[in-house]
Image (cartoon, helix red, strand yellow):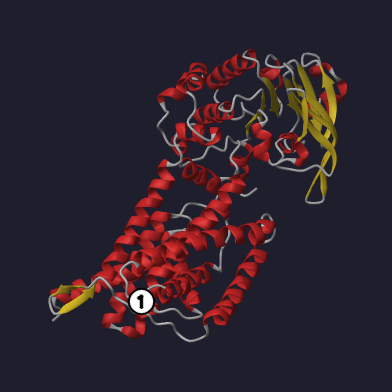
Amino acid sequence: MVSLDYVAVQTINALFYSSILFLVASGLSLIYGIMRILNLAHGAFYMVGAYLAYTVIILWASGSTLYFLVAPLVALAALAALGVGVERGLIRPLYGKPEELQLLATYALILVFDDLVKMLWGAEYKSFTVLAGGSLRIGRFTVPHYFVAVILVGFAVAGLLWLVFSKTMLGKQMRATAHNPEIAAALGVNTDRVFVAAFALGAALAGLAGAVAAPILTAYPGMGTEIIVLSFAVIVIGGMGSITGSLVGSLIVGFARTLMAATYPIMEIALIYIIMAAVLLVKPVGLFGREERERR
Amino acid sequence: MRVRLEDVWVRLGGIDVLKSVSLEVGDGVSVALVGRNGAGKTTTLRTIMGILKPYRGRVEVAVDGRTYEASRMKPYHVAALGIGYVPQGRMIFPDLTVEENLEVARGGPVPEDLLEWIYSIMPELKKIRGRLGIHLSGGEQQMLAVARALVRNPRILLLDEPLEGLAPKIVASLTQALAEIRDSGVSLLITESGNLKRVRKLVDKAYGIDRGEIIYEGDPHKMLEDPVARRRIWGL
C-alpha cells in the first residue's frame, strides 16, 4: 500500500527534477524558437554553471546559507556573458549557412568545455551536498528545504519569462523575430540584438540550472550531455520554441521519470522516449508547438 | 528623401534575377513597378531594404543632404532612414495583437497622435486593435501591414502588391488610404502584377519590369500603349 506521505515526497522529487529540466529546456527552446539554432552546447553551459557554483562554495564558507543566493547569481551572470561571447564569436558568422555547420560548431563547443572543465577542476565528481536551510518533515520522511526552493525558482522563472515575452518590448521583438526575422529586421527591429539577447538569456538559464542542480546531482564532466538528451525529449514533447511547452514537457518528463524510478526502474528512461514517440506520431510539432515559420 | 537604384544586379541560386535595374522613387514622386509574377518586383524591394545584396551596382538613399549606400547596410538601419516596408503576403506577426505589431515596428509605444492619424486613415484598425494577427481577415492584415510600415514616420513607403487578393470593396478603401498617405508627403513605390489601372491614379510614374530588366519607364497613363510593355508584360 502506497502511503500518502510517500506520494507527497515523490511529488516533490518529481517537481524538483522538472524544475531543473525546465530551466535547461526553456533556454534551449527559446534559442531554437528565435534563432533556429539547435544549440548542442546548451548542456555544456549547464555544466559550466554547476562548476562555477562548486567554485563559489569552495571559495565561500561551505554550508553558508548565502551560498544559495550567491552561486546561482554568479552562474547566471557568467553564463549570460559567455552566451554573448559565443553568439558573437561562433554563432553569428554561421547565420544563413547550412545547419550542419551550426551543429558541428556547437558540438565542438561541448568537447572544448568538457576538456576545459577537466583541466580546471579535474575529472572526478564534485560532490558538495551542503543542505543549508534545514528540511521539511512529511510523515515518515524529510525533504530538504532546498528542494522546495529549487521548485519555487523553476516556477518563478516560468512566470518571469511569461512577463518578459508578454509585457516587455524586447519580449515582443523576440516573438516577432521568432516568427519572421527577415521581416522584423526590414521593419526596423534590430534582430542582431534580439539574437544575442536570446542566446545570452538561454545560456544564463542553463547556467542557473547547473548551479541549483549541482548540490543535489553533483558536478561532473559529461553531466551536460545527460541533461541535454532529456531536454530534447522535453522540447520535442512540449513543442520547439514554446515556453509553455517546455514547462508542460518538463513536468511530463519529470513525473514520468520519478514514477518509473519508484515503481519499475528498468523503464525509467524508456517511458520518456515512448511518450516522446507517441507525441511525435500524434502531433509532430509537439503539444504546444507551432507549424514551421515561413522559410526565406 | 530619395531612393535610387543604379545598375543593380542581384543573383539568387546562380541566376541573375535583377539585371542592371535602375530606378528612382522619392522627393514627392511616387512610382509603380509593374511586371508579371517572377519578373523581379519583390527582389527589387528586398534589395532596397538591404535584405538582398547586389553583386554589382548600388542602392543609394539620399536623406537630409546625406547619401547612404543601402546595399551595404543592415535592413533595420535602412528602415531607420525612413523607409517603410509592406511585404508581399502581409507577413503580420500572428501571435502579436494589432497594437503589438505596431509597437514592435516602432520599437516602443507608438505616439498617440501618430496612432490617431493612422486610425483616421484606416478606421477599421481601431476596432480590432486588441485582436491577434492570426485572427485578422486578409483586408485587415493588409491594413495592419500598411499601418505597421507607417509607425516610424517614413518618407518613402515600399508596398509589395498591396491590393493582391483583396475584395473589390477593400481594394477601394485601401486605395483611398494610400492616396491619403501619399498626400501627406510620403512617396510610394507600389508593385503590381497586372492590373495597372488600379494603381495608376496613385503614382506619377511607372516602371515595367520583365525577367529582371526594366523595360518601360515613363507616364503610367501611356504604359498600356507602349508596344514593348504590352508584349512583355501583358502578352498583347
Question: What type is the residue that disc 1 sits on?
Answer: Ser
**Which residue shows up at 32% across the image and 66% down it?**
A150
Mark 1: few, some, or many residues within 10 Å (few <14, many ≥20)? some
Residue A83 in percent (x, y) is at 56, 60
**Which residue shows up at 26% across the image and 82% down it?**
A263
Compared with residue B31, is residue A236 higher up or lower down, i.e. above or below?
Answer: below
Q: In the drawing, does residue B228 fall left or right of residue B162? A: right
Residue nearest the viewer, comparing B92 with B137: B92
Residue A167 in percent (x, y) is at 41, 41
Residue nearest the viewer, comparing B142 with A198: A198
Local secondary structure at mark 1: loop
Compared with residue A155, is residue B31 higher up or lower down, i.e. above or below?
Answer: above
Numbered circles on residues, count: 1
- Is residue A279 visible in the rendered structure shown here? no
Residue B68 in percent (x, y) is at 77, 33
- Is residue B221 visible in the rendered structure shown here? yes
**Which residue shows up at 65% across the image and 19% down it?**
B186
Compared with residue A215, is residue B17 higher up or lower down, i.e. above or below?
Answer: above
Residue nearest the viewer, comparing B9 with B153: B153
Quadrant showing the N terminus of chain A: bottom left
| Badge 1: chain ID | A
Disc 1 target residue: A62
Q: In the drawing, does residue A153 fall left or right of residue B187? A: left
Residue A199 in percent (x, y) is at 54, 57
